[in-house]
Image: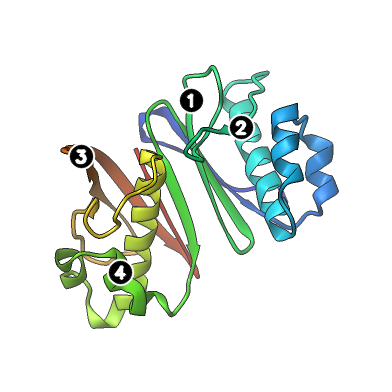
Amino acid sequence: MAIWLEKNTTHDSHLGIWKIEEPEDFFLRQLDLEAIEENELARIKGRRRLEWLASRLLVHQLLERHHPGLRLPVVKDDFGKPHTPDSHFHLSYSHSHEFVAAILAHSPTGIDIQFFVSKISAIAPRFMNEEELASLQASTRLEHAHFYWCIKEALFKAYGRKALDFRQSILVQPFDYQEKGKTVGQVCKDGFCLEFEVWFERDGEYFLAYCL
């Protein structure tokens, strides 16, 4: 299908979600891939190829809607962070099951989408610190933990330099559970901290978070 959801967020950033229902040929016909992109795709196998293609088409369509005629390749830097060379855009994308989400912005940004999985409660102490864990309530523990995971993944992507301890280096201002809201996150490493505004929302079995 076409873009399943699109919204213009704060700070002149653009977010879209694509529901993957098409075969690989659909995306290949619409994507005018550059050589560097074709080389990356050639190394990808299985379902990940569809996710890769859908994320690129989603980014290109967001660019086209807001900057008609602009065609930029999406490549990865030495740390694996996606970017558009020789442009001022920052971008991030994420996929889970049948959905791909992407965001374009003029400042560092990250996005994460996650399908509901019951095991997240058991692994929460691995990525949440004591203050964050204390904000979880028994009745919404699973759902709340999903938001923390999505937020931390989005912050990790916005930082884009790997080697981060999710418990100690990616910090989320504790918040009460709600199906749509906003909080603040920080990435702290080697004596400095970057602060981000963070938005989160739930749609059925999917949880979404993005930061700027």
Badge 4 crowding class, 10 Å Cα cut-off, few under 14, some 14 to 19, many 20 or more, is: few
What colour scheme has been applied to the protein in the rendered image?
A: rainbow
Q: Residue 21 occupies which quadrant of the picture?
A: bottom right
Q: For the image shown, how many numbered marks are present on the structure?
A: 4
x and y percent of residue 80 in the render? Answer: 51, 40
Mark 1 or 2 closer to N-term?
2
**In the rendered image, which residue does mark 3 sit on?**
190
Mark 1 and mark 4 in contact? Answer it, CB < 8 Å: no
Q: Is 98 placed left or right of 87 in the picture?
A: right
Badge 1 crowding class, 10 Å Cα cut-off, few under 14, some 14 to 19, many 20 or more, is: some
Mark 3 residue element: loop
Mark 4 or 3 closer to N-term?
4
Checking the image for residue 126, the label placed there is 4
Mark 4 residue element: helix
The residue located at (37%, 28%) in the rendering is 107
Kindly identify the amino acid type of the residue bearing the numbered disc 4: Arg
Badge 3 crowding class, 10 Å Cα cut-off, few under 14, some 14 to 19, many 20 or more, is: few
**In the rendered image, which residue does mark 1 sit on?**
89
